Amino acid sequence: MTIAEVSKKYGLSVDTLRYYEKAGLIPPVNRKENGIRDYTEQDCGWVEFIKCMRAAGLSIEVLRQYIELYARGNRTLQKRKSLLVAERDRLKERIGQMQQTLKRLNYKISVYEQKITACEKKLLK
């Protein structure tokens, strides 16, 4: 796949894909004779993984650590797991905070709905 196709498939800009490659978050992508990137299924798997982890809030630095550990092979399984567990715990905390924010927003919206309803009733009299 070309970089444009991968960009469209995953909803990432071409610049973002180039950055991920330059930052070492995805392995160097093979190129055709004319220099155009040629993404394999494995490359796309890395793109999908990085996109998912970034959406979950993992920093570039944490992802670099993970990729570095991954490159060292099975002897780093426990370290990789620990890193992901810590990130999961941070995500759960953020989700809890967001749920509280959602409750507060819903409350404020309901207050406004009540006020709007009361104003509309006055207008109809």
Image (cartoon, rainbow, N blue to C red):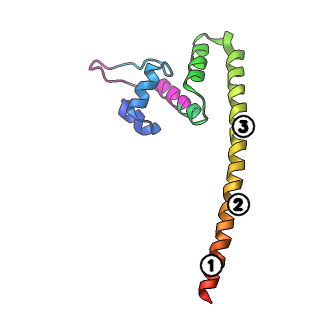
Residue range of the region highlighted in magenta in the rendering: 32-50
Extreme bottom residue here? 125
Q: Residue at 72% across / 37% down in the picture?
A: 93
Q: Position of residue 51 (x, y in %)?
A: 53, 33
Q: Is 36 in the magenta?
A: yes
Label 3, label 2: how far apart the Cα atoms are = 23 Å
Q: Where is residue 94 in the image (x, y as percent from the top left)?
A: 68, 39
* Picture quarter with the C terminus: bottom right
- Earlier along the polypeptide chain: callout 3 or callout 1? 3
Residue receiving disc 2: 107
Q: Residue at 43% across / 25% down in the picture?
A: 19
Residue receiving disc 3: 92
In the image, residue 116 sits, relative to residue 41, either above or below, namely below
Amino acid on which disc 2 is placed:
Tyr
Q: Where is residue 106 in the image (x, y as percent from the top left)?
A: 68, 59
Q: Where is residue 78 in the image (x, y as percent from the top left)?
A: 72, 16
Q: How crowded is mark 2: few (under 14 residues within 10 Å), some or many (20 or more)?
A: few
SS label for mark 1: helix
Residue 119 badge: 1
Q: Is 33 in the magenta?
A: yes
Q: Residue at 36% across / 34% down in the picture?
A: 4
124 or 10: nearer the viewer: 124
- The mark closer to the camera, 2 or 1, is 1
Label 3, label 1: how far apart the Cα atoms are = 41 Å
- The mark closer to the camera, 3 or 2, is 2
Amino acid on which disc 3 is placed:
Lys
- The mark closer to the camera, 3 or 1, is 1
Amino acid on which disc 1 is placed:
Cys
